[in-house]
Amino acid sequence: MKQVTMKSPMNIGNIPLKNRLIMAPMQQNQGTLDSMATDYHVNHYRERAGGVGLVIIESTGVSPNGRLYSNDIGIFTDDHIEPLKRIVDAVHSEHTPIFIQLTHGGRKSWPEAINRSVAPSPIAYDDFYGVPEEMTRDDIKHAIAEFRSATKRSLQAGFDGIELHLAHGHLLHQFLSPLSNQRTDEYGGSLENRLRIIREVLEAIREEVGSDYPVQVRVSASDFAEGGLSPVDVAHALTYLEGFIDAVHVSAGGTLAVAPLADGAGYQVPYASIIKQYVKVPVIAVGRIHTEQLANFILADELADFIAIGRPLQEDPYFAQKLLGE
């Protein structure tokens, strides 16, 4: 059997990827005041699309009250569709598929860019963000509807797949983590209850895209804190979601303002390898995987199925080609 390397093709869902390298979503902070993508984004993603098997664009807000920054990009009105379609067309011109990452910031939404901060529970991330309002059931239904509307617009913009952001302390991660979710209703308490809104969002997405369209999730495999999520907790959570998803993108942290215990080369790969033991869908590893030797080791030893690259591609649009030796 031929050994798997970065150059080995593989599918996510029904989308064939020419290699195992993925451009990780990284915030560009180049959007307009009303969260429109610009020529900067078109050029940025086109320049980096040639070497990778898949581009995932930066976190894209599903709600005007879920914006991560005052200069991020969004997909919460129909006016956002055309600027995003220009990015899609630019990446497709390089013969590369492109996914959109859909996000609501919850209690980590930028205070100066929103009218109201909401979260599962009225617990502040820090003094800058302040104490959010606890979401009512109507608020939860509204957020699910916003993800549904964003999904419809993603299809209209021509994206090849969706990555649902469950990581980095944003709204859906806030529901999943017991550190930020202290509700006593059907959306809090047990793991199944804390997962409820995530399942409902994924159900809404699937109702819009059907069963064949690629949908993946990005997770934080650890909260880096006692009483928070562990990799095994997140792996168990994913077994409840696996019927809705085609891949898992494994990151870590973000619920609290704490740093990981280690941050060297491949420091998040152990999280991916744990989750890979629990799920049948492909697993994407990320986190300082910057050398050919390390990337191929991860793939050959089946610690993960894909390698996502962030910062090096930000600094050098041709980093993927260099990593592949092309």
Image (cartoon, helix red, strand yellow):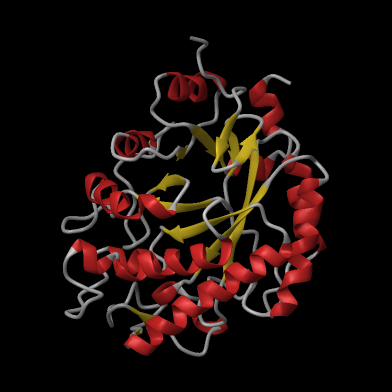
Q: Is residue 89 left or right of residue 75?
A: right
- Seen from the viewer's position, the closer of residues 250 and 153 is 153
Q: Is residue 81 left or right of residue 212?
A: right
What residue is shown at x 51% (from left), y 82% (from top)? Answer: 65
From the top left corner, tell me how far across and down residue 281 is, in percent: 42, 40
- Seen from the viewer's position, the closer of residues 310 and 99 is 99
- Seen from the viewer's position, the closer of residues 243 and 278 is 243
Q: Quadrant of the C terminus?
A: top right
Residue 70, above or below 321: below
How many numbered circles are shown? Answer: 0
What residue is shown at x 78% (from left), y 40% (from top)? Answer: 95
Q: Is residue 276 left or right of residue 21?
A: left
From the top left corner, tell me how far across and down residue 78 is, in percent: 71, 78
From the top left corner, tell me how far across and down residue 259 is, in percent: 34, 51
- Seen from the viewer's position, the closer of residues 241 and 254 is 241
What residue is shown at x 57% (from left), y 36% (from top)? Answer: 11
* Image quadrant where residue 157 sits: bottom right
Instruction: Tell me if residue 33 can be seen.
Output: no
Residue 318, above or below 257: above
What residue is shown at x 42% (from left), y 75% (from top)? Answer: 106
Instruction: Tell me if residue 38 can be seen.
Output: yes
Q: Residue furthest top?
A: 1
Residue 150, above or below 41: below
